[in-house]
Amino acid sequence: MTQTLNETHNSDLRSWLDSANTPGADFPVQNLPFGVFRRQGSAEPFRVGVAIGDQILDLAACCDQGLLTGAAAEAGRESSLNTLMGLGAAEWSALRQAISRLLRSDSAQQQQAEATLVPMSDAEMGMPAAIGDYTDFYCSIFHATNVGSMFRPDNPLMPNYKHIPIGYHGRSSSIVVSDTPVRRPHGQTKADDAEAPTFGPCKLFDYELEVGFFVGAGNDQGTAFSVDQADDNIFGFCLVNDWSARDIQKWEYQPLGPFLAKSFSTSVSPWVVTTEALAPYRIPAFERPEGDPQPLPHLDSERNRSHGGVDLDLEVFIRTPQMRQQGLEPHRLSRANFRDMYWTAAQMLAHHGSNGCNLRPGDLLASGTVSGQDKSARGCLLELTWRGSEPIDLPTGEVRRFLQDGDEVILRGACEKEGTARVGFGECRGTILPA
Ligand code: CA
């Protein structure tokens, strides 16, 4: 079971690599997230690495040296995590244990392992998985209520909201890894007072702070997961920015939901933090207010109720061209927590498979915008500026209602609590290019 604590979570563990032991570091020896990388500017094949401190452990090189063996380690020679994801929780866990032992301060193979390290500053990160299918949910009741009340003031939440995790099929071909620039899309829009729609560059460009998770072995078509099986089928988590063209969305979303307002680009962070690494941060599922319906049995379990949530702190920052010129640090726009989602990741995955739809290794599911109850925890500009009516003041004196060309949006995430090692997610960055 991927939520059981074991020797790899021990907060006393230290690595022989100093940068992994720095307080506040995202990638201590207790984290060990997986990604896909190669040396910058090289013609090397992309391959699997594990983040440790400010370095990347090269799994293929470890296999060549005999430091790691077995099918899971050998899957590290591939240019995506899909094969590793498909092997299942027992293999993931065994590999994590072997990597942990290799990187700990008492490792007998420090010198050989050290020789396989590639500095992150020399690396180019690739897409962590070949994503066959991508589904985006809408699981923050705070976000859904805020957005719903802008468009349907008398009826913000649809009657299904508290019974099923609402989602739509996203576009996998346009998912890009962090640091890939994102071009402002063109689309058809119609102003409220206009007679007819026009086609042109998006004027209301937004981000959405989301948490993504990758499917492991998956299910056969015609079969379904229980919630607990779904939980065991989540390989790991990443940060997702679901770039959104609000003016295009407003005109196209009825009756079948978002389409071109979302499909031009979605950014993901390069490091996939495993479900196992998050074990110390599992918490009860969102506590439903009295009077809300309980989930139907196929979306419910004892384990989900007690451990379905993840205490994951999330932040969004902006850096405008003017801020860059003046050497200013990115400005924080909001801070939220993944624990505030109305549905858990396992419930989203169980729901997805409940009709017999097959989920496959490397499929990506995203949570929907993570917003909390407070204004400071609203995960997109649409909510933060209330459709542009409450602009945000930046340290340069600039204001923002929506994103401008050249703006960079940075998502960060980390799990932290007293007596437990910090598990960081790194960053998901994207800068907007003109249409
Ligand atoms: Ca979304």
Image (spheres, grey):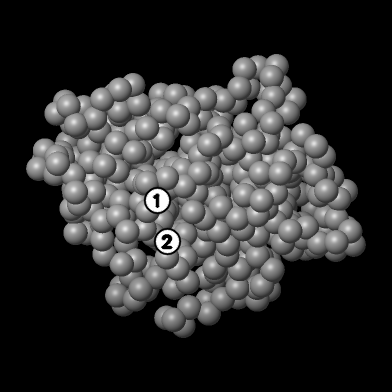
In the depicted structure, whether residue 272 falls above or below residue 194: above
Q: Amino acid at mark 1?
A: His
Q: Residues within 10 Å of mark 2 (few under 14, many from 20)?
A: some
Q: Amino acid at mark 2?
A: Thr
- What residue did someone put label 1 on? 9
Q: Position of residue 257 (x, y in %)?
A: 73, 41
Residue 104 bears which disc, if any?
none
Q: Is residue 18 left or right of residue 347?
A: left
What residue appears at the point 26 percent right and 25 percent down from the top-left corner?
Answer: 69
Badge 1 marks a residue whose secondary structure is helix
Q: Nearer the viewer, residue 159 or 346?
A: 346
Q: Nearer the viewer, residue 430 or 423?
A: 423
- What residue did someone put label 2 on? 420
Q: Residues within 10 Å of mark 1 (few under 14, many from 20)?
A: many
Q: Are marks 2 and 1 in contact (CB under 8 Å)?
A: yes
Q: Is mark 2 within 8 Å of ligand 1?
A: no
Alpha carbons under labels 2 and 1: distance apart: 8 Å
Q: Position of residue 413 (x, y in %)?
A: 46, 59
Q: Position of residue 289 (x, y in %)?
A: 81, 62
Badge 2 marks a residue whose secondary structure is strand
What residue appears at the point 71 percent right and 35 percent down from the top-left corner?
Answer: 351
What residue appears at the point 51 percent right and 62 percent down from the top-left corner?
Answer: 313
| Residue 301 seen by the camera | yes
What residue appears at the point 55 percent right and 58 percent down from the top-left corner?
Answer: 311
| Residue 427 seen by the camera | no
